[in-house]
Image (tube, rainbow, N blue to C red):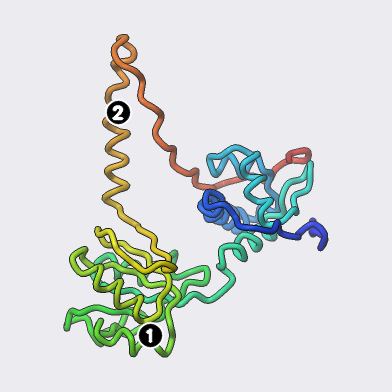
Amino acid sequence: MWVPSAAMVAPRQGRIPDATVSRLPVYQRILLELVRTGVETVSSEKLAGLAMVNASKVRKDLSYLGSFGTRGWGYETRYLLSRIDEALGLDRDWPVAIVGLGNLGRALANSPGFTSRGFRIASLFDVDPGLVSTRIGPVVIHHLDDLAAVTAGDPPAIGVIATPGAVAQDVADRLVEAGVGSLLNFAPRVLAVPAGVLLRYVDLSIELQVMSFYLRRKGHRGLEASGEGTAPPEPPVALAHPIGIAAPGPGEV
């Protein structure tokens, strides 16, 4: 098996661009599937095709992590996966607190995909008396009023807000006051947080609205064939699912 030398793995100095950071999890997911299916090497062209980007962009993205590809052979999948895991912090333990144990919060707490790769459900909170003191797996659901006391013993790195929008700001405030510096908000509410607090939104309704925009414009493409109107831009394509991928042949870069 190809093994990189120490001189080949020195990472580039400086900040990794946000666009690259957003693509690293895509590469990580593809590589994880390649490793699981026994593929030992992958070319930049193959990885680019699966990630729906061009090969030069893949090579540039990966160059921020170091220089460890071999011309004519490609990347050793297991090693590249470990470098991306390290860059994304997936080789560390990240305690997660989830507030709101309705259908969505419970699904997140039970999701193997959410709780894998270093993300550990450390604490759960709700205000429903029927849920408080019950368990999801080994984790006890506590009342939201006990958030500061509970998290003091195992401070969460990430707070997940899965509550109704009306109470999301109050929950965010409580999490910040408890020292949580990163928030993942599933509630349909724009939040205000102090500078320095990382805030990310996951809003399925917004994604559906974006899809409806492109679906509506797609419906007008028939006008172009009749000479009426202008063809709309192509909508974003979905990521390919890396199933049944073959290893690159000799000579692939």
Residue 1 seen in this snapshot: no
Where residue 111 sits: x, y (%)?
A: 39, 67
Name the foreground residue: 41 vs 129. Answer: 129
Image quarter hosting the N terminus: bottom right
Residue 150 vertical position relative to residue 30 in the rendered view, above or below: below
Q: Residue at x 72, y 54 (%)?
A: 76
Instruction: Please determine whether, in this image, residue 194 is positioned above or below residue 37.
Output: below
Identified by mark 1, the residue type is: Thr
Residue density around tag 1, few if under 14, some if 14–19, many if 20 or more, within 10 Å? many
> Crowding at label 2, few (<14), some or many (≥20) Cα neighbours within 10 Å?
some
The residue lying at 64 percent from left, 39 percent from top is 55
Amino acid type at circle 2 is Arg
- Circle number at residue 217: 2
Q: Nearer the viewer, residue 71 or 250?
A: 71
The answer to whether any part of residue 195 appears in the image is: yes
Query: Nearer the observer, disc 2 or disc 1?
Result: 1
Q: Nearer the viewer, residue 21 or 141?
A: 21
Q: Is residue 48 left or right of residue 166?
A: right
Q: Position of residue 86 (x, y in %)?
A: 62, 66
Q: Secondary structure at mark 1?
A: helix
Residue denoted by label 1: 151
Whole-angstrom CA distance, mark 2 to mark 1, is 48 Å
Q: Quadrant of residue 106?
A: bottom left
Against 219, is 177 above or below? below
